[in-house]
Image (spheres, rainbow, N blue to C red):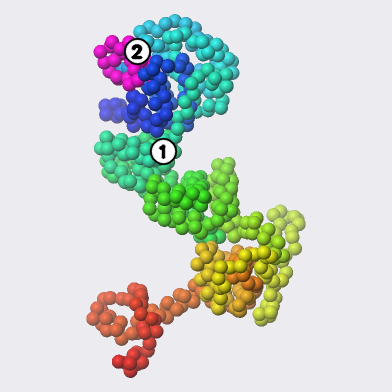
Amino acid sequence: MSDTSAAYRVLARKYRPATFADLIGQDALVRILTNAIRTSRIAHAFMFTGVRGVGKTTTARILARALNCLGPDGKRDGPAEDPCGRCESCIAIAADRYVDVIEMDAASHTGVDDVREIIEAARYRPVSARFKVYIVDEVHMLSRQAFNALLKTLEEPPEHVKFIFATTEIRKVPVTVLSRCQRFDLRRVPVEMLEAHFAAVIAKEGAEIEPEALARIARAADGSVRDGLSMLDQAIAEAHGGMIAADAVNEMLGLSDRLDIYDLFEALMRGEPAAALAQFDEMYRAGADPGLVLQDMAELVHRLTRSLVVPAASADAALPEAERVRGRKLAEALSMPALTRVWQLVLKGIQEVNAAPSAKPAFEMALMRIAYAAGLPTPAEAIAQLRAASPVTPPPPTLPLLAGEETTAPAPPIEAAGETATPEEPSTVAPPRGAPAPDAPLELTDFNAVATLFEERREPRLHSHLIHDAHLVSFQPGRLVLKLGERAPHNLAAEIAKRLIRWTGQTWAVLAVDEDGDATLAEQYEDARRDLFERAQQHPLAQRTLEIFPDAAIADIRPIQPSEALVEPPEEQDDKR
């Protein structure tokens, strides 16, 4: 091993705070401790609690230096709110070789005998320091007998002894111990503060990083400075002196692209499990971890729900512009009941993925459950349908899971004989009593107008099914007969009828039949575009242009005048000229 490798210190140790001013995200703690030292109101026992990596042990060591700092000239006669870092005490404590500052790991010293040693040694005055300081890390690991043995000394310690405890599991510490300590809860460091801190570390290390990569490391750190610095250390090593790219950070951490989460979520909300599975397959091949994808989805659902309650939350400056725009559109298109239901399903999926022998199958099952649940009515909608005496379209017949298991009777086949052969009109709904009249009467003259109405009323999932999965059989005002494709949910007709009644204030019957219908609107749009494209290629102006530029080709058509003028037969145009 080279000398350089032997001397290297990881970033988490290299940039560990040495003074209270260096601590980030813990302003309340710093203010209280510095004021206590300044006014000589220093407690005899402190309890620092918080998640991993927020600075509990670091703060304990800074406090130990502050209590025993002798000043640069070695003549200070009291604790210092700002340790000098140059006196013998500060240097020795930082190097963990100061005889009067004893640091003990309670995870490996859990018994009552270990505590008895502390109690016996506490009776003796410090060798050279102002205070004898005991730092006990992970104090919740002490046994019940050890805690009991410590109580009396902790309540009335000698005046030259200070106890500093640190724990991540404050609930496991007996209340009798907590009542004898000053408790400080160290907070998670905000993402914006982590980004600024990591950017300063990158500059000191002489490295370069893309802003998006820096933001993703800060988000993945989850409020922990140490975790973030460890990830940053790994990213610098991976870049090998080059720019730290966002894609490299994603691959390193097993994260998926943030916008991929939006694509996956939108496919689920449209009720398209096949598209969602295809999207996840691409993310999985790129290195995405199923558990982390579900956590990102839970974070997205929480952010969208919060945006519905607090619209200003959708303008979070910590998010990239693309995420803010898509998040705002999703929040406007989804309802609170739908988001609440997805939240519960995502949480259940996280539990199943963590417990399953193989994460990917469990994740895909969770995706399919969410996709099929997206088309179900909310409890309020189901109650409204029942009150309106509207039978809901029955679900598909249940298949036996095991040999010999009973199953429900299959649904009767739908007989088609012209427009009158329909099922038991499951989607014919009358306006409920007391329902408010629409703001203005709506006149729907054709199926295209119906689809346009769903787009205007911000129903993207139903609009997508009407465009891609519905074949028109017949249309009359108040009566719509459709043949539904395989991808359409079984209750699509009921949902369309319910919304048409609410929006128009009229009775609507939306029927799903098993007979041939017209092409879908999406197919008609594509056919019309293809026909327009072919006719435009025959236009004399287009042909003359292609003769002048033989290597050119028509890529797209964007008319700047009514389409009739563009697609008139050439001879009619010549007559007009």
**Residue 203 picture location, percent across and down:** 27, 37
Can the viewer see residue 558?
yes
The kind of residue on which mark 1 rests is Pro
Please state which of residues 535 and 365 is positioned toward the viewer in this rendering.
535
Of tags 2 and 1, the one toward the viewer is: 2
Residue at the disc numbered 2: 78
Left or right, 348 with respect to 416, comes to: left
Please say if 13 is above or below 251: above
Disc 2 packing (10 Å; few <14; some 14–19; many ≥20): some
Q: Where is residue 404 in the image (x, y as percent from the top left)?
A: 75, 55
What residue type is disc 2 on? Gly
- Identity of the residue drawn at 27% across and 35% down: 204
Q: In this view, does 461 lie to the left or right of 508?
A: left
Q: What's drawn in magenta, residue-wise?
A: 63-86
- Marks 2 and 1 sit apart, C-alpha to C-alpha, by 34 Å
Residue at label 1?
A: 190
